Amino acid sequence: MQTKEWYNKKEILELYPLSLATYKKRIKNIDSSKTKFINSKSGSPTRLIHQSILDELFRKRRRLSSKEFNQTIKWVRNHYWNFIGNIVPVSSTIQDLKNKMRFLFDELKSLQMEKNQIILYYSIEKNSNDNFYHSHFLIDCARDMIEQNDIKDKLTIICEPNTLYESRIHLEEYNIIYDKDGAIYSSKEVRYFYEILHK
């Protein structure tokens, strides 16, 4: 969560999945009241941009190219998601979960009216009480909205159902209350594997 008031170029490039050229392009017509310059040791003044307009300027919706894998975590944290959830199948390995999440993606695609309008990000994490794994995921289906119950139906194909004693499937709408926190949690750096599926 952003706590600073002013950000320099280096800090912005650490937060958002941008190239230097894109950064320069987006600040061309910036509101002068939201930027300021301070002296720097290198000689040239350092531009600072107010935190209130960072998302407006830099949090644009677009997909990553395969060459931008190193930007994945920043992209996930700045993307706009429709659903957030996790599954905890019984006795799942990392490879098993990869297969399950890729199967889920194919199943979700079958619900779409148009092709290539869904994005699924998932990450795999070790269970805290055994040697197996579970998966967190985020879904963007804004352009061809899929019903929450339809997603739940697909999740029951790859994971055992919830019981009175165990929660195996969790799914909810990614609403404004989450802001970026849900995406940040789902993309923690300690994950064993992560992947974005979108084609």
Image (tube, rainbow, N blue to C red):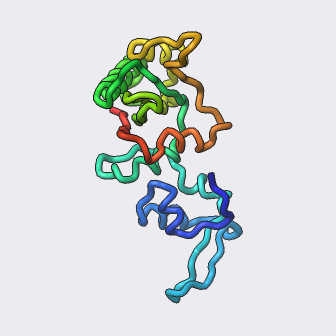
Q: Residue at x 54, y 67 (%)?
A: 28
Q: Residue drawn at (49%, 27%), measured in percent from left and top? A: 86
Q: Position of residue 104 (x, y in %)?
A: 38, 21
- 189 or 40: which is nearer to us? 189
Nearer to the camera, 85 or 148: 85
Reply above or below: 157 against 134. Answer: above
Q: Which residue is painted at 63% across and 42% down in the image?
A: 179
| Quarter of the figure with residue 98 | top left
Q: Quadrant of the C terminus?
A: top left
Q: Residue 158: x and y, percent?
A: 38, 16
Residue 4: image location, x then y, percent: 66, 63
Q: Is residue 136 visible?
A: no
Image quadrant assignment for residue 106: top left
Depth check: 131 or 53 in front?
131
* The one of 53 and 171 positioned closer to us in this rendering: 171
Drawn side of residue 155 relative to residue 199, left or right = right
Q: Is residue 71 above or below residue 108?
A: below
Residue projecting furthest to the right: 33
Q: Residue at x 62, y 51 (%)?
A: 1
Residue 116 located left or right of residue 182: left
Q: Is residue 111 visible?
A: yes
Q: Answer with left or right where residue 145 lies relative to residue 116.
A: right
**Vertical placement of residue 151 versus 83, above or below:** above
- The percent position of residue 101, horizontal first and vertical second, equals 36, 26
Q: How many marks?
A: 0
